[in-house]
Image (cartoon, grey):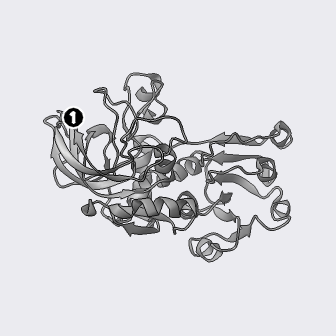
């Protein structure tokens, strides 16, 4: 066992604190990663505060991990010591079900092993990236292209793939009109990626505060949805809407802005149900869908796409000791657009 430094939640109501945790020994197919940077995702906050269900404490979160290979197992072939690598939201799956055999580990019928707060193969609970080292099966370790900025790339491992996957699946590209709801950690990457795919992008945000950023990222239009009648003026405008907001919205009003046979895809995950009138779907043949992350193959595809097109998250680098303040700022939408922990400060 390897003892490593980490920052952990002792309970659902207490601040995160420094802690020493154990990592398993490097097995034949394992990679030991020296973590350099770890992104702060809203999912981390939901998880440690018990908003998505009970978890086991203490819990180290963080599923946006960038680092270097420090050691490899005897049977590892895809990675070498010193390689720049990343780890996203998954660290294992059953490998046997129909979805795993098809390369869709994120849809594992047994439930994939999440990077944190998930039962691991040895019966322990997985601990995430707010730490100095992690041991991961080589099949779930991603290659980080040299063109991606090392200190800013981590959020691509969650926020990047979360927005890339539905944009790719619903064929965002030249001739398509895409709306991105919310301009936070997910939304700003959704805008950048959709623009790089060739789509005409509109940002739907509550106020005008991020209009200049939206246009700078390549959007052709920014609409402040908090203004009276803003959505009514957009009826029948979009082929695809990516909703990144983790809060209740008037979904029928947003569905009305779709063209016939358009799709509204949720990647934000509010804890409350989202009521939808079936007539909002039937009358225009519209789809109301959800999307999670992506497979390992698609996540690597996303990283390579971002490297090719010069796409990187907008980040603010913080120390580990600043994570509790960062959580409060995330909840107050006071970050542009993603916090990244420098793990050298652990």
Q: Is residue 168 left or right of residue 27?
A: right
Residue at 83%, 57% in the rendered image = 235
When asked about the image quadrant of residue 288, the answer is top right
Image: 162 above or below 184: above
Is any part of residue 193 visible from this angle? Answer: no
Q: Residue furthest front?
A: 14
User: Label 1 belongs to which residue?
Assistant: 29
Total numbered badges shown on the rendered structure: 1
Q: Quadrant of the N terminus?
A: top left
**Mark 1, other Cα within 10 Å: few <14 / some 14–19 / many ≥20:** some
Image: 338 above or below 164: below
Residue at 58%, 45% in the rendered image = 169
Q: Nearer the viewer, residue 294 or 24?
A: 24
Residue at 80%, 47% in the rendered image = 252
Q: Nearer the viewer, residue 195 or 175?
A: 195
Q: Residue furthest left?
A: 74
The x and y percentages for residue 216 are 57, 75
Q: Nearer the viewer, residue 56 or 267?
A: 56
Residue at 58%, 60% in the rendered image = 187
The x and y percentages for residue 132 are 25, 53
When asked about the image quadrant of residue 2, the answer is top left
Q: Is residue 150 left or right of residue 238?
A: left
Mark 1 lies on a secondary structure that is loop
Is any part of residue 212 visible from this angle? Answer: yes
The x and y percentages for residue 207 are 70, 70
Q: Quadrant of the C terminus?
A: bottom left
The x and y percentages for residue 43 are 50, 48
Image: 335 above or below 266: below
């Amino acid at each position: 066992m390897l003892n490593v430094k980490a920052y952990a939640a002792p309970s659902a109501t207490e601040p995160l604190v420094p802690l020493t945790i154990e990592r398993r020994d490097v097995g034949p197919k394992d990679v030991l990663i020296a973590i350099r940077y770890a992104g702060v995702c809203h999912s981390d906050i939901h998880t440690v505060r018990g908003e998505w269900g009970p978890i086991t404490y203490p819990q180290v979160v963080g599923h946006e991990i960038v680092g270097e290979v420090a050691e490899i197992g005897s049977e590892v072939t895809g990675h070498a010591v010193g390689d720049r690598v990343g780890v996203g939201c998954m660290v294992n799956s059953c490998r046997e079900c129909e979805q795993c055999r098809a390369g869709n580990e994120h849809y594992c019928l047994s439930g994939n092993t999440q990077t944190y707060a998930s039962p691991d193969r040895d019966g322990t609970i997985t601990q995430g990236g707010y730490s100095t080292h992690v041991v991961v099966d080589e099949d779930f370790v991603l290659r980080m292209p040299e063109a991606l900025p090392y200190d800013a790339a981590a959020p691509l491992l969650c926020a990047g793939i979360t927005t890339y996957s539905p944009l790719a699946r619903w064929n965002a590209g030249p001739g398509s009109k895409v709306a991105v709801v919310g301009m936070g950690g997910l939304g700003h990457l959704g805008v950048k990626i959709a623009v790089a795919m060739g789509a005409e992008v509109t940002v739907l945000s509550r106020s005008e505060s991020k209009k200049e950023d939206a246009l700078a990222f390549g959007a052709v239009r920014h609409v402040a949805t908090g203004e009276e009648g803003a959505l009514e003026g957009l009826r029948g405008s979009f082929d695809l809407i990516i909703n990144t907001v983790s809060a209740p919205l008037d979904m029928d009003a947003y569905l009305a802005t779709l063209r016939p046979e358009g799709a509204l895809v949720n990647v934000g995950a509010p804890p409350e149900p989202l009521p939808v009138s079936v007539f909002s779907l039937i009358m225009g043949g519209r789809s109301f869908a959800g999307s999670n992350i992506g497979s390992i193959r698609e996540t690597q595809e996303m990283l390579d796409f971002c490297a090719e097109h010069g796409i990187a998250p907008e980040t603010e680098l913080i120390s580990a000791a600043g994570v509790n303040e960062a959580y409060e700022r995330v909840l107050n939408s006071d970050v542009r657009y993603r916090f990244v922990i420098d793990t050298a400060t652990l």
